[in-house]
Amino acid sequence: MIKRIFAIIGLVLIFVWVLATVVVAFLPFPGKSLIFGILAAGCVILPIMLWIILWIISTVTGKDNIATFRSKEMNETMNQAEIIKHNMKEANKEQSAEE
């Protein structure tokens, strides 16, 4: 539930930030280039920061979400690959022993 609330707040924040960037781009006032530069940089930095926060939440809680590096499916696939690798090594040892 907290992730959903955080996601909604993040989306609203990104929307407002982009809207402010567009508004500043079209309004003539002194110091516009500095403010526009900050807002434009924020359009890149803000989503990255939100993703990092989601990743930290998934790491702390141990629950998978969109920011999780390894999902349960990926872990299962990696485990299966390790089993296959182990079986191949055993088969090569047996084959070497027979020769």
Image (cartoon, rainbow, N blue to C red):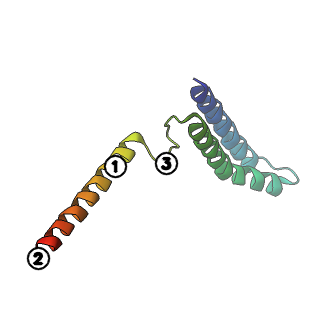
Q: Is residue 92 above or below residue 35?
A: below
- From the image, state whether disc 2 or disc 3 is nearer to you: 2
- Single out the residue that lies furthest toward the left: 99
88 and 44: which one is in front? 88
Decide: marks 3, 1 in contact (CB < 8 A)?
A: no
Please give the count of numbered marks on the rendered protein.
Answer: 3
Mark 3 or mark 1, earlier in chain: 3
Residue lying at 61% horizontally and 38% vertically, measured from the top left: 60
Secondary structure at numbered mark 2? loop
Real-space CA distance between mark 3 and mark 1, rounded to the nearest whole angstrom: 16 Å
Residue receiving disc 3: 69
| Amino acid marked by disc 2 | Glu
Q: Position of residue 62 (x, y in %)?
A: 54, 36
Secondary structure at numbered mark 3? loop
Residue receiving disc 2: 99
Residue receiving disc 1: 79
Real-space CA distance between mark 1 and mark 2, rounded to the nearest whole angstrom: 31 Å
Q: Quadrant of the C terminus?
A: bottom left
Residue lying at 77% horizontally and 53% vertically, measured from the top left: 38
Q: Position of residue 13 (x, y in %)?
A: 68, 36
- The 10 Å Cα crowd at callout 3, few under 14, some 14 to 19, many 20 or more, is few
Mark 1 or mark 2, earlier in chain: 1
Q: Position of residue 57 (x, y in %)?
A: 61, 37
Left or right of residue 69: residue 78? left
- The 10 Å Cα crowd at callout 2, few under 14, some 14 to 19, many 20 or more, is few
